[in-house]
Structure formats: C-alpha cells, structure tokens
Amino acid sequence: MIDRRSLLLSGSASLAMAGVPPALAQGKTGLAAGFSATDIGQLDPHKAVGTPDRIAVSWIFNGLVRFKDGTIDPAQMQPDLAESWEFNEDKTVWTFHLRRGVAFHAGFGEFTADDAVFSLQKAAKPATSSFSGDYRAFKSVTAPDPYTLRIELANAIPSLLGMVANYSGGFVISRRAYEQRGDNFTRAPVGTGPFALDSIVPNQALNLIAHEKYFRGAPAIKTIAYRFLNASASRDLAFQSGELDVAQGVQDQRWVTRFKALPNTIVDIFEPAELSQLYLNMDTAPLNDLRVRQAIACAVNRDELVRWRGADISRPGLSVIPSGTLGYTADNGLPKFDLEKSKQLLKEAGHPDGLTIPVIQTQYPDMLNLMQVVQAQLQRAGIKLDFQLVEHSTFHQMIRQDRSPLVMYSAARFPVADVYLTQFFASRSIVNTPTAVTNFSHSRDVDSLLDAARTEPHQDRQVALWQEAQRKLIAEVAAVPLIETLEVSARHKDVQLGYDLQGEMAGGVLLTERSSLA
C-alpha cells in the first residue's frame, strides 16, 4: 500500500514548482486543496460571483450572522460578528449587538460597527457590489455606538438575516484596509475569518495562513495552499498522488463512482443544488418570438440530462427557482419534452429549416459539458447554438454586458424565493443597466408580484405570490430550467471538517477553526 504521507513529502517539489511553499505539504497542520480555476478573479467578497472565488472568500470573511456549519437552513441562523439582535413589531428596524475584541487580519485593528456600516453600504452600491439589488429595501444603516448596528428598512423583507449572513453581500470587510488598498483590495483582502491571505502566485496558487487571533480560537490548520487546477484530470492526479488533501469534484456520476472506490477517500455530496437554466433575451430576435422560446423549451429533455449527469448528484429542474427554496412550486405549467412540437413551433415562427443562435459560453468544464449536451438536444429540433468559448471570468464580464442572447447560468442562492426571483427576473436587475444583477432575460412582468410578496405579513400568501410569479415566467419562457446539480468534493479521510456537511452556500467545503488533519 502506498503511504500517503510519504507521497506528500515527495510531492513537495511539484508543489513548490506551483508556487506553493513546501511546508504546506508537510506535517499535519498544512492543507492543500485543488479547485477548478485558472486564477483567483475576485477576493472582494461583494464582487465574488464565481464558485472558485466564493469558496476562498468563505474562509476569509464573516457576516453578522452565519449559517450553522454544514447547513443552508435559514431557520438555523447563528450569531457570527453579532452576538444578538432584535427587531420592532413590523420588522423594519433591526438592532444588532456586536462582539467586542474581534481582530481583523494583518494588524488592521478591532472590528467595530463602523466596519459593518461601511460593508453593508458598499454591498448596496452597484459600483462596488454584484449584489446591490438585494439591499434595495435598506433605508439606513447606522452605528449608535462602536458595538451596535441599526438597520432601518423601507419595508419588511422576507429574510433580513440572509442579507447580513456569511454569504455574498453579507460579508464584513475592514473599512480601513479597503480605503487604504483601493482597487488592490480584491487581491489583498482583509477580513476577520479563520484564515488570512498570505500570498497569491498568479495562475498557480492562493496561499492562506491561520488567523491566530480568530475570535473563536486559533485554527488547527495553519496553512492552506489553494491550488488553481482547472483541468479535472490534473486535480484527480494530484489528489490520488497525495499532493492534495481536498479536491473540487466533477459533477458527473462516473467521477463520483470512481472516487467513492478510492481507498481512504470521502466523497461529499451536498446542498444547495445549483439550478442550471437557459435565460432567453426576450428583447432580441429571434428570441423575441414566444414560439421560438417555446420551441427551445420543448426541445430540452431533462430526463436525459439527469441520466447523463447521474442520479446521485442531479435532479430535473422543474421551475425557474431551485427546489428546496421557500416558495418553490413545480405546479407551474412547464412544457414537457416534445421534439415534434418544437419543430412545429419553429415552422410556425417562420423557421422551417431551423435557426442559429450565437452564444457566449464559458470554458469552465462543468458548465461547458452540460451546455454541449443541451446544444446536441436543441440541434435535433433544428436549433443550432453557435458557441464563442471564453475563459470563465471573461464569460461573467461579457454576459453582464448583454452580449449573448442566450445565457446558460448555474446558480444557488439564499433559499428564499425572493432572492432568486429578484436577482434573475426583476426589471431593476436587467443586465447592462445601472442597477444590473443577473436578469439576462429582460423580464419585466413580475415586479408587482415580488413587491407584494415582500410586504405580505402572512407566509402562505407570500408563498402564493412567489408561485404565481413562477407560473408567469414559465408561461412567457423567460428561462428554461434544465437540471439541478448537487455540489461534489473529495477529501482524504484524515481531513476532519469539524461538522457534518449537508450543505454549504459557497459551493465548496467550508474550512473553519475546527477543521483539522488527523
């Protein structure tokens, strides 16, 4: 039997060549992880939208509250930088009482309410945040004293705690560090989390060190080498040779089956399922014709997608928001797979010989592989997708400039319908506008339903409004749901997470002060 620790030692040279200090491959306190990335794009947490960036950000920053480790259940929110909170009767004024003595990384002093105010105000500005639309109801954020934060809302929202959690715009940064470092902050972030940035070797590795003054205690893992290994074959080889302790998985049944058979290996499959769907620009020909959009919807075979990806890790997408989300309904009129109907709709729309749609498509392997299967399905109906392949960060830039009439996007969000529906279908979220988020469809018809749901005090009526919005979006074919895919990761059995991993909003393994190498 191959001894893994001897492999770790012999692998030090290759780690060093990748820009990773050899010490990270030795002993029981240094962890090496490999992820599907060519480089880090954004370590400013309010701009981190890609999964590789969000995973790293989750180790560096805290929110005022946090998801219970290993879950994505909003009913189990716990204190984080805030110790406690209360709200008024109509939930429009929230007061958070903050921890004292919380240290920022790199000697940037103590966290105070001023940093929390600055962070939330930054998260609410389109120029400095990719999640600004989430904070539209925020009327004011103030600090009555250094350890008290007050948020006043224009109206009650479905989950205020989700907006201040350790996720997306809820992460808290050092105001002083951001103002000092300016544009460099994204490559030199300062948070309060269990791990701090040590160095970045471009296109090779992100190196992190334990935050010894972390308020929950010094982490057991002292160093992390976050290696950029975009090719799954490279990650697999590095993991099996002992160079990696943790490897981002491939959302594919064959990969899962193969890795489950490896000795001393744990395969984690966890929520949230990312919903992948086609967003159709209803303002641009030929997609401004409902019949063309319906033809695309009828040409998608979800059962085939699940068979291709694997039943252990996927399920059919049956609405324009993910299942498991508060407000979800599959009773929405989603068209079933019907190839002949698809061809007939194209003929009625004036395209008897089919049509071609140009598509900007990421090279990110999991998304590209799925889109190639969808491309083949649509081709059977006479719909050709002409791909322009680009690097993943470039893909995010270009689709937000409204340069692709059809966008395949995979996402998991805070599991309340308002968040997903607002980000992808509210008119103020239309891409390439001052308040843009991720409305690639140019949908404008569900605003009143979403606004009504936000102020509805009775949850059953609120859910009914969200369900009506889903039916309306399905009827106009603003998007075509494809498949829901669970997150996948592999780790050697001596990597102890310190919690039971059932779900993680960042899309990857969360490393905390309790995580260790046995």
Image (tube, helix red, strand yellow):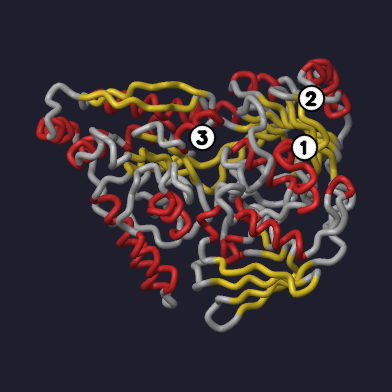
Q: Position of residue 135 (x, y in %)?
A: 55, 60
Residue 465 rendering spot, x and y as whole percentages: 34, 66
Q: Name the mark nearer the viewer: 3 or 1.
A: 3
Task: Please tell me whether residue 196 is drawn above or below residue 94 in the rendered image.
Answer: above
Q: Which residue is mark 2?
A: 4
Gap in angstroms between the C-alphas marked 3 and 2: 38 Å
The kind of residue tagged 3 is His
Horizontally, residue 254 falls left or right of residue 210, namely left
Sooner in the amino-acid sequence: mark 3 or mark 1: 3
Asked if residue 179 can be seen in this view, the reply is yes
Give, as a three-letter code, the residue at label 1.
Answer: Asp
Task: Report whether 269 appears left or right of 340.
Answer: right
Which residue position holds label 3?
396
Q: Earlier in the sequence, mark 2 or mark 1?
A: 2
Residue at image point 63% right, 74% down: 94
Question: Which quadrant of the figure contains the N terminus?
Answer: top right
Mark seen at residue 494:
1
From the top left corner, tell me how far across and down residue 353 is, in percent.
15, 21
CB atoms of marks 2 and 1 within 8 Å? yes
Q: Looking at the image, can residue 67 be seen?
A: no
Q: Which quadrant is home to the C terminus?
A: top right
Between 430 and 20, the one lying in front of the other is 430
